[in-house]
Image (cartoon, rainbow, N blue to C red):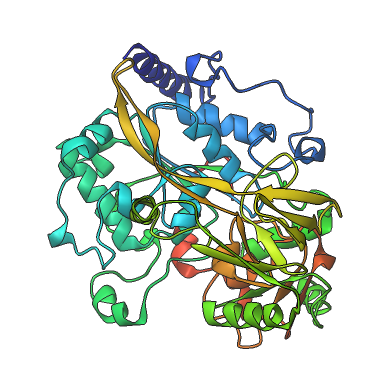
């Protein structure tokens, strides 16, 4: 309780300072952020020297540190942390998740796994159907106590959160916390790039859905008009740090600006797939077809590895994360192209490569990124729930289910939805059927580090980069760092 009081008191002082001086006060580092090195790495806030490494161990840049300070010390209730592809949003969420009293959620199982969190549906006991307001009920039991006692709730990949789900979370929190304030007065941190992939809505759901909500984005939720989030933008670029022109090009596309010069540059990439490129598709059927085609051509021996987890463990994992990160049975051949779905000292999540050796204990992969051969053992994927620590009286994350399997997927093709959040070595974009939703083109292109690292089937059109009109209102309010 003392730490919470310090946060509350610091927030009051911060708010008073803002009003009196028009300038924020950065209070000295306290218990909550003592593990973060606040020493600037460079006087230039966007120096690429700090971006030489990626992943969970990368040092925080100035914008990320400022975001931590603002969220922890501000008296504001709702925050929206935005940033382009590769700006370090997931790294920042991981930093938040390392602290007790913070609940981390995401709209999909894959996104939840990356931040050691839970899906929104699992955390708030939401059905997989449309969230009709008259059917929403409050939380109860341990989950209600957890929500009552947590200090803040993080929602990652906010661009993919649908309006009905956003409203449902709001209503559940109001009912559970017995408060009419938005989200029951709980501190909420929304994280994501609103210009990336929008929410998914099944064709069979559209009639019923659009009778209740005008659009899919959170901007069309009932609660959005009641909140005025403090917007913080992460301006650095970890992924495209080595290609400044490409970084600036992507920043323009992210804002819906596609000049003739930009379009000409992109359309110079029309051509066949480069050697070892990952094919990025717009649907599962296309990705599965490409993977099957290339895999079937290999004449080497097939090896099959079932998961080492028990059926009960697998069922629990699916209950918490909606789906498994890799198949229950992994089938591979020497010479097979794969994508690694885990991090280690020698490889990163999203690394692509070619299998050079298969043994019972590990799969050896020659990485495209480094040319080095690495041994990839079975990985223990963890699904988290939360428990009340009797020693601290704080709700803390706890491993609730484990899934043991080699962390690899067939790497010839992947959907743009599975690619979001990944850095890929080379990409071939299957746009021959045209992009059919906002953010797909931008998300696909921004997976690579350099402009020359992607190719495409057909010319891009200016309409491929139109900004979703639903999200334009997000950036109208005053923000910590302008859009």
**Which residue is the extreme one toward the bottom?**
433
Where residue 240 sits in the image (x, y, percent)? 77, 53
Q: Is residue 388 above or below residue 447?
A: above
- Residue 373, percent from left and from top: 82, 52
User: On the picture, is 271 further left or further right than 348?
Assistant: right
Instruction: Please give the name of the residue rendered at 38% of the width and 68% of the height, measured from the top-left corner.
Output: 216
Q: Position of residue 307 (x, y in %)?
A: 50, 56
Residue 349 visible within the image: yes
Which residue is rendered at x = 45% and y = 54% of the image?
Answer: 158
> Which residue does the image show at 25% across and 61% down from the upper left?
127
- Taking the image as shown, residue 252 lies to the left or right of residue 391, namely right
**389 or 297, nearer to the observer:** 297
User: On the rendered structure, is 231 left or right of 12?
Assistant: right
The foreground one among 116 and 294 is 294
Farthest right residue in view: 371
**Compared to 395, does 138 lie above or below?**
below
């Amino acid at each position: 309780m003392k730490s919470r009081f310090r946060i509350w008191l610091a927030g009051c002082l911060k708010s008073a300072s803002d009003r009196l001086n028009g300038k924020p006060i950065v209070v000295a580092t306290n218990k909550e952020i003592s593990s973060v090195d606040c020493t600037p790495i460079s006087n230039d806030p966007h120096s690429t020297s700090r971006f030489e490494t990626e992943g969970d161990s990368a040092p925080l840049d100035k914008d990320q540190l400022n975001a931590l300070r603002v969220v922890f010390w501000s008296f504001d209730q709702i925050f929206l942390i935005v940033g382009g592809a590769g700006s370090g949003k997931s790294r920042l969420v991981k930093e938040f998740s390392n602290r007790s009293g913070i609940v981390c959620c995401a709209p999909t199982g894959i996104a939840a796994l990356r931040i050691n969190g839970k899906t929104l549906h699992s955390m708030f006991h939401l059905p997989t159907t449309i969230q009709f307001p008259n059917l929403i009920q409050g939380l109860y039991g341990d989950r209600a106590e957890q929500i009552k006692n947590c200090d803040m709730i993080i929602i990652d990949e906010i661009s993919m959160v649908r309006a009905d789900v956003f409203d449902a979370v709001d209503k559940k929190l109001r009912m559970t916390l017995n408060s009419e304030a938005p989200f029951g007065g709980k501190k909420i941190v929304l994280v994501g790039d609103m210009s990336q992939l929008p929410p998914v809505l099944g064709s069979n759901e559209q009639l019923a859905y659009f009778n209740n909500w005008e659009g899919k984005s959170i901007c069309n939720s009932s609660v959005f008009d009641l909140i005025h989030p403090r917007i913080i933008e992460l301006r650095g670029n970890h992924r495209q740090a080595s290609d400044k022109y490409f970084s600036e090009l992507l920043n323009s596309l992210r804002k819906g600006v596609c000049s003739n010069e930009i379009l000409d540059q992109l359309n110079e990439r029309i051509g066949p797939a480069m050697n070892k490129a990952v094919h990025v598709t717009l649907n599962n059927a296309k990705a599965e077809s490409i993977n099957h085609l290339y895999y079937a051509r290999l004449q080497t021996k097939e090896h099959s590895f079932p998961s080492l987890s028990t059926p009960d463990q697998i069922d629990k994992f699916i209950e918490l994360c909606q789906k498994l990160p890799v198949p229950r049975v992994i089938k591979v051949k020497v010479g097979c192209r794969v994508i690694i779905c885990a991090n280690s000292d020698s490889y990163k999540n999203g690394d692509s490569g070619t299998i050079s050796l298969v043994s019972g204990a590990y799969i050896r992969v020659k990485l495209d990124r480094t040319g080095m051969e690495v041994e990839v053992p079975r990985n223990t994927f963890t699904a988290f729930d939360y428990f009340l620590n009797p020693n601290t009286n704080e709700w803390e994350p706890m491993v609730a289910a484990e899934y043991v399997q080699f962390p690899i997927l067939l790497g010839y093709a992947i959907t743009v939805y599975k690619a979001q959040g990944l850095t890929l070595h080379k990409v071939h974009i299957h746009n021959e059927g045209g992009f059919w939703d906002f953010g797909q083109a931008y998300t696909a292109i921004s997976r690579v580090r350099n402009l020359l690292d992607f190719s495409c089937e057909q010319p891009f059109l200016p309409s491929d980069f139109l900004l979703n009109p639903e999200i334009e209102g997000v950036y109208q309010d005053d923000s910590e760092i302008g859009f």
